[in-house]
Every structure is written in structure tokens, then in C-alpha cells.
Image (cartoon, grey):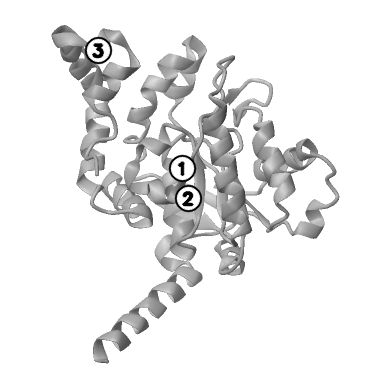
């Protein structure tokens, strides 16, 4: 298992400016200036863990404590396939939070992740990797087709899947005067529309730093470089997420097209009221139940 997320060799493959002796020195400086070395150190301290255990270890190391509103709605997710759909305000750590929460309830939960998140190899058992479209960039068809095929098979076998339908981090939208997702991807909406399984809307109520959104006004590539530092500025903050009402297959039938269902889901997320109360992960009843059952199983095994 790699002990770094991004290594010097990865940068060399990305651009010729990082090659050769002078290029490697520049790469080392680049990694230091943009906190990639800090991300690698963070990853290295937890890479011995896998899946949800890794996610929990990373969040603890970062000092990130999230709280969940309407957590009682998670009780209905113990069995069978379902889909979670979420806004994507952080562009990385929100995916780690989702795996930390959902994979504790369902270890078979997988999240469709972009190639940035999929660099986190210790969580690959909970990721289905795809490459989202960036601007006018064309995609490698096999990357997305394979990811979609894996997703369909996962659902058909009775397992849950999670989506960030935007496929990219949320940005400040002057039209709405708030931080919102970009337009949700048509291919993901088609997949959700055709799946015919319960859908769980999940909203992250907080966002990245003001600097992050300011950099977008200059150039999206400059904003992208800021992403590693956004991991470290949430220490000690009370990050809030809410669980929406589960949308049954019957309710979904009133939406005849993927786009109409997508608009409904996006509206549900962005109009979701702030819950009146929140619970820490350790206080959520279904997780307490799972933990207690594991303790019972372990103790009974040791007495046999």
C-alpha cells in the first residue's frame, strides 16, 4: 500500500516541468507550497487502516467533528439497495465523511468518486472511480463506462451506492447568491432514474473558505491548487449534515425523465431546512446498536 497520496513520480507523469534534477527540486517546492506534503503526511499516519476505519482515523487526525441532523432516518437503511445523493461543498472531505457514516451502517456502501478522491487508496474498497468532465475536456469513455457498469452491478446485487451528482466541488453562484453545485451530470441522473431503488438526499450545510471561492474568480486551476489546504482549515469546526426524507420508488415514478428527477432531488437538498437538533456520530442510535451487537458477538466468541 502506498504511503503517500501524490508522489514525485506522479507529478513527473503530469507535466514535463517536474522531470529531471531541476524538475524534481521544483516538484518538492510545489508540494510544500501547496500543502501536498502535509496531505501525504496525513495519509501516511492512517494508511494502515482501510475503508471506514481509514475515514474515521483521518477525520480524528484532522480534528474534524461532524454532526448529523434527522439521523433517525438512517434506521431504514439496514438492508437492501439504496442511493444517497449529496451536494459537494468541500470537494474531498465530504466524501470521507459520507464513507465514515454510511459504511459504519452498511460496510458494502460504495461512493462514486472522482479521480482526486480515488487517489486515496486506503478507501478504494468503498470507491467506484470515474473521471468527471472539466470544462470542454473530453473524457476517456472506458473510465466512465466501467464505473457505471460497476455501479449498476453493485445495486443489482442489493448493495448501496452514493453519488455527488455534480462530480465536482460546489462553487459560489451569483445567480443564487450562495454556494451551489454546478449542473448535475446527465449520465449520473440517468443511472439514478433507472435504478428504481430508494433515494436518500443528504445535505452538507457548510462550505469551504472565502479564499477558495475568490480564487475561482481568477482561474479554476488556481482554485484547484488550494484544495489540499481546505482539508486543514476545518479543525475544531462543527460540520453539519442533514438526512432528508427517503424517496420511495413509487414517489420517483411521477418523474418521467432523469432531468426532472434530478431537479427535484437538487431542490430537496438546497431547500432542506436546517434540522432543529444534531447528533454526534457516537450518539446516533443505529450506530450504537451496531457497536453493541459487535461487542456481544466478540464477547460470545471469546467464551466459546
Residues under numbered marks 2 and 3 in contact, where contact means CB atoms less than 8 Å apart: no
The local crowd at label 1, few if under 14, some if 14 to 19, many if 20 or more residues have their Cα within 10 Å, is many
The quadrant the N terminus occupies is top left
Q: Position of residue 95 (x, y in %)?
A: 46, 44
Total marks drawn?
A: 3
User: Which numbered tag is attached to residue 222?
Assistant: none
Asked whether, in this view, residue 153 is left or right of residue 59, the answer is: right
Residue wearing tag 2: 98
Local crowd size for mark 2, using a 10 Å CA cut-off: few (<14), some (14–19), many (≥20) = many
Residue drawn at x 74%, y 59% as measured from the top left: 248
Q: Residue at horizontal 41%, vertical 32%?
A: 116
Q: Is residue 198 above or below residue 139?
A: below
Of residues 233 and 202, the one drawn nearer to the viewer in this rendering = 202
> Which residue, given by chain and number where applicable, does mark 1 sit on?
94
Mark 2–mark 3 Cα distance, whole angstroms, equals: 34 Å
How would you rate the neighbour count of disc 3 (Cα within 10 Å): few for under 14, some for 14-19, many for 20 or more? many
Left or right, 8 with reference to 21: right
* Residue at disc 3, secondary structure: helix
Vertical order, 288 against 271 (above or below): below
Residue at 39 percent across and 78 percent down: it is 292
Q: Estimate the x, y position of residue 2 in percent, counting from the top left.
A: 24, 40
Residue 192 quadrant: top right
What distance separates the C-alpha of mark 2 from that of mark 1? 6 Å
Q: Depth-wise, is mark 2 or mark 3 nearer the camera?
A: 3
Q: Earlier in the sequence, mark 3 or mark 1?
A: 3
The residue to which callout 3 is attached is 18
Amino acid at each position: 500500500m502506498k504511503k503517500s497520496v501524490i508522489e514525485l513520480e506522479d507529478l513527473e507523469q503530469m507535466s514535463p516541468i517536474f522531470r529531471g534534477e531541476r524538475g524534481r527540486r521544483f516538484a518538492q517546492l510545489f508540494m510544500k507550497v501547496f500543502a501536498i506534503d502535509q496531505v501525504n503526511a496525513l495519509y501516511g499516519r492512517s494508511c494502515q487502516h482501510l475503508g471506514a476505519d481509514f475515514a474515521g482515523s483521518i477525520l480524528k487526525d484532522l480534528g474534524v467533528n461532524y454532526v448529523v441532523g434527522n439521523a433517525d432516518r438512517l434506521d431504514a437503511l439496514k438492508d437492501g439497495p439504496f442511493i444517497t445523493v449529496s451536494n459537494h461543498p468541500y470537494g474531498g472531505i465530504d466524501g470521507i465523511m459520507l464513507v465514515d457514516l454510511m459504511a459504519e451502517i452498511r460496510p458494502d456502501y460504495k461512493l462514486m468518486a472522482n479521480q482526486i478522491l480515488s487517489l486515496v487508496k486506503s478507501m478504494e474498497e468503498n470507491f467506484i472511480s470515474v473521471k468527471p468532465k472539466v470544462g470542454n475536456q473530453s473524457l476517456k469513455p472506458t473510465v466512465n463506462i466501467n464505473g457505471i457498469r460497476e455501479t449498476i452491478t453493485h445495486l443489482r446485487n442489493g448493495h448501496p451506492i452514493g453519488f455527488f451528482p455534480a462530480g465536482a466541488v460546489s462553487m459560489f453562484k451569483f445567480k443564487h447568491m450562495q454556494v451551489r453545485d454546478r449542473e448535475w451530470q446527465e449520465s449520473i441522473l440517468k443511472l439514478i432514474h433507472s435504478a428504481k431503488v430508494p433515494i436518500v438526499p443528504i445535505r452538507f450545510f457548510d462550505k469551504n473558505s472565502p479564499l477558495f471561492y475568490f480564487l475561482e474568480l481568477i482561474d479554476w486551476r488556481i482554485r484547484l491548487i488550494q484544495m489540499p489546504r481546505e482539508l486543514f482549515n476545518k479543525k475544531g469546526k462543527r460540520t453539519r449534515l442533514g438526512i432528508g426524507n427517503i424517496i420511495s420508488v413509487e414517489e420517483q415514478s411521477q418523474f418521467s425523465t432523469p432531468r426532472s428527477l434530478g431537479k427535484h432531488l437538487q431542490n430537496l437538498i438546497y431547500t432542506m431546512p436546517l434540522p432543529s437538533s444534531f447528533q454526534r456520530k457516537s450518539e446516533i442510535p443505529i450506530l450504537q446498536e451496531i457497536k453493541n451487537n459487535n461487542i456481544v458477538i466478540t464477547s460470545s466468541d471469546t467464551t466459546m
